[in-house]
Image (spheres, helix red, strand yellow):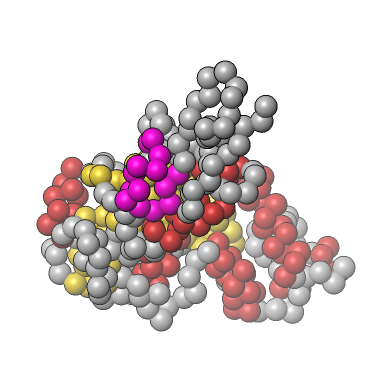
Amino acid sequence: MAHCTTVMPGWFPLEKPMACSDCNNTDKIRTTTAILLLTREDDAMVSAPLKLSRSGIEIETLPRCSGVYRFYDAQGVLLYIGKSVDIHSRVTQHLNEGRKPGRHQRLMSQVCHIDCELTAGEVGALLTENAAIKAEVPLFNRRQRRLRKLWTITLSGSKSGFLQPTAVDFAPAGTRSIDTFGLFANKHRLTTSLQNLARDHALCLRVMGLDRGTGPCFQYQLGHCDGACAGRESPESHNTRLLDQLSQQRIAAWPFNGPVLLREQTIRPTDHQPEAQFHLVDQWAWFGGFDSPQAAASALLSAAPGTFDRDAYRLIYGAIFRGRVSLMDAQRGVEIENPLLGGVTPAS
């Protein structure tokens, strides 16, 4: 005899059905937990409601502010990490999406505990989520492949004034004193990328130092090169076009004299939401968010050398370029000017 499934308003069942009083099957039926949408007011309706917490402290409802949330199963295994400017609304979306068959339903059917970590704004939520996913490796987040060695492009001028790209090892740590362009898994991919760039934009591989020989190159004879190798295009014009294309993959030199604090502030914080956070950054590496400049300065004294992360770089560069944070000297605790406002297009 088929068992019926009881669905409470605002809830959805897990993979196993809840037993009803009309079922006469003598087999033992494991009564499962239905997920409480966003409140624990109706605990009497289920045997084991969803547990909600804020940084490990039990709470009654999920907050309506920015932050990071973590889904755990009944054994405490980390299933998923997400972020939102409104945790309450985002988890509601997860629950609604979990009604449909598929991967998301498999995720939500296992969730027994949601823990949230509040931030002062979206920048902090993005940086925290990015670091947490890579450090904690949740089961349902997309796995990000880590490469032991990366290659990048540097530019230097030739005797004739043309910029020439060179493939170099990308050091994940250390001082970033010059602009570099792109990150590649191996040297072959880097070279192929430059060849495709030249083909698509009529750049000359010969003046770029990537095609041996003298005089007009073969691509110029085919009409695929604008003629820098034949004196038809000036170094200034060719260099400008090359930089325009490479700028889409630009990894900027660190524009400060030392570590800085990115100060993010919310105008009307909710309960327990930090009014301001100070993100410690040096050489584009993120060292965490802190409640005060003093706490960040203290952490800086014992911080291990930072490692470059491309996703964190994009988040940090974008936040500074768009003026979403104010800047402070991390060692002196004084405000400093933003050198990126009104500058070059943000790196992608």
Question: Residue at coordinates 39% horizontally, 28% vertically from top-left?
Answer: 75
Pick the residue in front: 171 or 237: 171
Per the image, is 46 magenta?
Answer: yes
> Which residue is farthest right?
222
Residue 90 percent across, percent down from the top left: 45, 58
Q: Is residue 123 above or below residue 344?
A: above
Q: Quadrant of residue 84?
A: bottom left
> Which residue is farthest bottom?
342
Q: Is residue 114 above or below residue 237?
A: above
Per the image, is 146 magenta?
Answer: no
Residue 316 percent across, percent down from the top left: 38, 62
User: Can residue 341 be seen in this snapshot?
Assistant: yes
Question: Residue at coordinates 35% horizontally, 48% vertically from top-left?
Answer: 42
Q: Quadrant of residue 159?
A: bottom right
Image position of 261 (left or right of 48): left
Q: Which residues are magenta?
A: 35-48
Question: Residue at coordinates 32% horizontally, 54% vertically from top-left?
Answer: 61
Residue 299 percent across, percent down from the top left: 18, 48
* Quadrant of the snapshot with the N terminus: top right
Pick the residue in front: 54 or 133: 54
Q: Quadrant of residue 70?
A: top left
Pick the residue in front: 17 or 64: 17
Question: Residue at coordinates 66% horizontally, 30% vertically from top-left?
Answer: 2
Q: How many marks?
A: 0
Residue 4 percent across, percent down from the top left: 60, 37
Q: Is residue 187 above or below residue 160?
A: above
Q: Main secondary structure of the magenta part?
A: loop
Image position of 10 (left or right of 338): right
Pick the residue in front: 103 or 253: 103
User: Can residue 148 be seen in this snapshot?
Assistant: no
